[in-house]
Amino acid sequence: MSKAWYSKKWVITLLHIVVWVVLFSMPYLLRPSWGENRPINKNNTEPVLVHLRYALNNIIYIIFFYINANILLPKYILKGRYKQYGLVAVGCFLFIMFMTWLTLYILLNDHHFYLRGHLLFNLFFFLFILGGSLAYGMIKERAREERVSREKETENLKTELSLLRSQASPHFMFNVLNNMVALARKKSDLLEPSLMKFSSLMRYMLYEADEEKVALEKEIDYLQSYIDLQQQRFGKNVQVNVQMEKPAMHYEIEPMLLIPFVENAFKHGTGMIENAQIDIILQATEGKLHFKVSNKFVPGSVEVKDKTSGIGLSNVKRRLQLLYDNKHQLQITKQADWFTITLDLKLH
């Protein structure tokens, strides 16, 4: 994702230059005749030297501004070393006072340094620059922390999503392989198409799922391969009704977003269930996806947690929240002996 125009480095640099130019142009804007038509000092030094001295003193303050914000603030203030910072700040102020006298002495050849007047003026301006520098430094540090936090969250999200995508049920894999072994022993004609489906399923998991978005058609093909292998595994023990319509238009979706619902149905809708049945409906029209998975279950049964069972529904809810926050509706209902998951999603 590209940066917003206002956060680009050249824009920020230009903004800093404009602010400094405006700030240090104020004496000229407020007093157009500043330094003209009047003696500058007892030697009537040329006004150009006055302007040069003013510019040099401003450059000193600008340097102090960024040194304080980028070096002193992180080194002392953010680490709670306030006394050391105070001493360094006083030292910086004395150095600026010295440079003010030095530029006066060298450029204007003025040996009369009015300490009180220069002290009051420079102290006020020094505190102004110091406060602005601290504010800028704190804002910059806060922005850096937020950026790091977002980067960490993004990396954690990528890691989490990558893990979720790769978490196909090991039980499913082992059962499919065992079923293929049985088909090989029987020299069944179903072995070759089963291997092809299993190969396409693994290819999608290992390669296609790395993409940020995939075509909805590929996700549907993946679901169909998964369902076909499960149907082959359970045979007549489970009635599976599938109505998945491929969309007329091209839509994209987060890869492996729908498989957890189907996996959950086969996990909890099979086994010691009389007349086991699973219904799967998928429709995509007018930029909206309607996905519904229903399975029979035994009311009152206690679910056994299985750490190797693959993607849990709670993790899928988190993925939906992170990736489709205000673009989805997920309903999970239990009525009689039916467990139903309905997902309505806005497609891109």
Image (cartoon, rainbow, N blue to C red):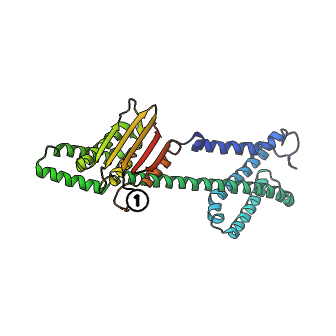
From the viewer's side, name the closer residue of 251 and 128. Answer: 251
Q: Residue at x 37, y 62 (%)?
A: 304
Q: Secondary structure at mark 1?
A: loop
Q: Residue at x 47, y 47 (%)?
A: 331
Dividing the picture into quarters, in which one does residue 85 lie? bottom right
| 154 displayed left or right of 220 | right
Residue 308: give x, y in percent of width and height.
Answer: 34, 60
Q: Is residue 247 above or below residue 54?
A: above
Dividing the picture into quarters, in which one does residue 196 lie? top left
Local packing at callout 1 (Cα closer than 10 Å; few below 14, some 14-19, many 20+) is: few
Amino acid of disc 1: Gly
Q: Count every numbered label the image shows and give the total.
A: 1
Q: Is residue 14 above or below residue 169?
A: above
For label 1, the residue is 300
Going by the picture, which residue comes out furthest to the top?
248
Residue 129: give x, y in percent of width and height.
Answer: 74, 54
Residue 66 visible in the shown view: no
Residue 208: give x, y in percent of width and height.
Answer: 34, 44
From the viewer's side, name the closer residue of 286 and 241. Answer: 241
Q: Residue at x 77, y 45 (%)?
A: 51
| 99 displayed left or right of 268 | right
From the viewer's side, name the closer residue of 45 and 209. Answer: 209
Residue 200 visible in the shown view: yes
Residue 266: give x, y in percent of width and height.
Answer: 32, 51
Q: Residue at x 38, y 38 (%)?
A: 282
From the viewer's side, name the closer residue of 339 and 130. Answer: 339
